[in-house]
Image (cartoon, rainbow, N blue to C red):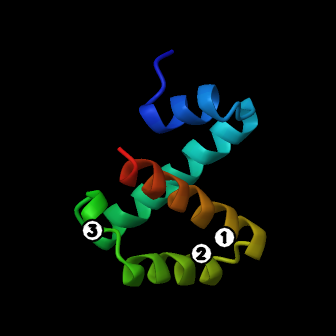
């Protein structure tokens, strides 16, 4: 199976565990779904502080635990850092 570049980086360069990769991919899919539901074009340049705050607020309203919210934000931050380094 061919992994997208950020996942390959985590797997091969950071030696991330399989469960970490699955969680990371799920977190990013969740964020992409939020973007679509908000009617925001899914482009990295569209990820603003305001959008991330709305995402956090939506997760909180949906009853996600603070740890889950933090992990999802960490996944997003990791992706943005990876893309910023490329």
Residue where numbered disc 3 is placed: 46
Are discs 2 and 1 less than 8 Å apart at CB? Answer: yes
Placement of 52 over or under 32, stated as above or below = below
Q: Secondary structure at mark 1?
A: helix
Q: Residue lying farthest front?
A: 85
Placement of 45 over or under 27, stated as above or below = below
In the image, what residue occupies the spot 61% across and 84% down? 61
- Judging depth in this view, the residue of 77 and 36 nearest the camera is 77
Q: Quadrant of residue 20?
A: top right
Q: CA distance from mark 3 to mark 1?
A: 20 Å
Q: CA distance from mark 3 to mark 2?
A: 19 Å
Are discs 3 and 2 less than 8 Å apart at CB? Answer: no
Is 1 placed left or right of 47 in the picture? Answer: right
Q: How far across and how far down the image is residue 34, in percent?
A: 42, 65
In the image, what residue occupies the spot 49% across and 75% down? 55
Q: Secondary structure at mark 3?
A: helix
Q: Secondary structure at mark 2?
A: helix
């Amino acid at each position: 199976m061919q992994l997208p570049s950020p996942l390959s980086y985590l797997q091969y360069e950071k030696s991330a565990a399989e469960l970490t990769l699955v969680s990371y991919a799920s977190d990013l899919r969740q964020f992409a779904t939020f973007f679509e539901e908000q009617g925001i074009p899914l482009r990295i340049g569209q990820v603003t502080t305001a959008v991330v705050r709305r995402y956090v607020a939506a997760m909180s309203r949906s009853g996600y635990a603070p740890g889950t919210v933090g992990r999802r934000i960490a996944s997003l931050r990791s992706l943005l850092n990876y893309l910023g380094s490329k």
